[in-house]
Amino acid sequence: MNASNTQYEILLQNLLADHADGLLKGVVSTTALLTRYGLTGDLYVKNLIHIAEQIQLAMPEVEPSDAFVAALYAQLVGEHDHNMFDRLVAWRIERLRHLPPHMQLAAGLGGLTLTAGLYWIVTRGRGVNFQSVVKAAGDLLPALPSSERSA
Amino acid sequence: MNHNTRPPDFDYASADESELVALAAEDKMAFGELYQRYVKRIYNYFYYRMGSHEDAEDLTARVFIRAMAHIENYDDRGVPFSAWLYRIAHNLVANWHRDNDRHKVIPLDEFLANKILTDAPDTLTEIKEEQELLLASIRRLPEERQQLIFLKFVERMSNQEIGEVMNRTEGAIKSLYHRTLSTLHEDLTTKGISLGRVAEEVKRKRRVRKNNA
């Protein structure tokens, strides 16, 4: 790569970085930016800027379901309350809805058995060793999705 | 001497992250607070990497279970807690692909409303399809480039912050960003995908309507 190519490359990298910063702050003027960098006629850089703008539109922040967040919290923290089992069950049922009907029964039975197991582990008393709860949950959890996928 | 003691009325919600991290190995409530601060971000990471809510839930759960089991190994020197979590997440995605050998593109099972308002359902569908094609193209990128796109556009991190997560310099991230956009451009062009075509058409029609009114 010769010196002018390297200069162009660095110019381009800086322009794209400035563009992305402006885009995320909602204050970018592409025309002004291209003028500032002396690249108004550069179709290649315009194409890259266009792609960056389309990426921003295509990637809005998404929200995990409340049931999932609450169930995982309960699993991690071992929160001892009477609603926890309900939340774990609600989460499992919500997940079952996404499966084809013929898979739902097998996955449901397996999932609820494991949910009950998780609940038992988490709630069997304050005297239980915290690290063993984490380890047990860690051993059990990966089994949940794979049992559903292969059901 | 135990450095990780706290008063009985300790307020987890307003505690510094470093305090919570120091406590978390022995205090599950401290870990719970860290979880609440980061669960949405980690979930988003997986959602855009994997393309489905189910996989995002599974992998999010695994990140936090793994983080909890290994938090005593986390060393605060120079690497933010979030960067540590993202590294766990990155490794899980790599393992997931290796174990499942599933590199195929999964369409997003749910798409939040895009920012272009239109009253025509067909147009909305076309815009959504265009965006799905773009996301599919992003998922064909190498792992580290997908991570960069996520950290920049969803996490809205600066190049310096991305560098901390990815263990690269700010300059290296700038260069990688340029090469990533360039690769996407090439991929989309090769496949004959023209982004923003539908949105441009909507804007053009609106201008015509406005001028005619």
Image (cartoon, coloured by chain):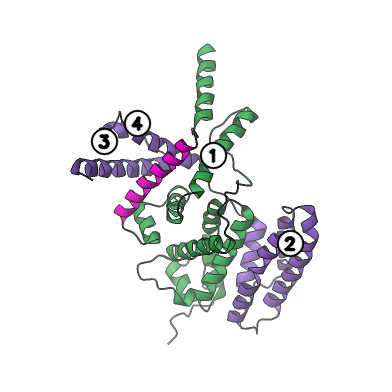
Chain colours: A purple, B green
Q: Give how far apart the Cα atoms at labels 4 and 2 are.
A: 51 Å
Q: Give how far apart the Cα atoms at labels 4 and 1 are.
A: 22 Å
**In which image quadrant can residue B35 be found?**
bottom right
Q: List the residue tagged with mark 4.
A: A43
* Stretch in magenta: B169-192
User: A66 and B123: which one is in front?
Assistant: B123
Residue found at x 45% / y 41%: B187
Query: For the residue marked with disc 1, what is the amino acid?
Result: Gln
The dot on residue A151 is 2
**Mark closest to the chain's N terminus, 3 or 4:** 3
Element on which disc 1 rests: helix
User: A129 and A100: which one is in front?
Assistant: A100
B207 is higher (above) or lower (below) than B166: above
Q: Nearer the viewer, mark 2 or mark 1?
A: 2
User: B85 and A125: which one is in front?
Assistant: B85
- Spot occupied by residue A103 in the image (x, y as percentages of width and height): 77, 58
Give the letter of the chain under mark 4. A
B87 with respect to B120 (left or right):
left
- Spot occupied by residue A125 in the image (x, y as percentages of width and height): 69, 81
Residue found at x 45% / y 62%: B82
Contact between marks 3 and 1 (CB within 8 A): the answer is no
Q: Nearer the viewer, mark 4 or mark 1?
A: 4
Q: List the residue tagged with mark 3.
A: A37
Residue found at x 74% / y 61%: A151
Element on which disc 3 rests: loop
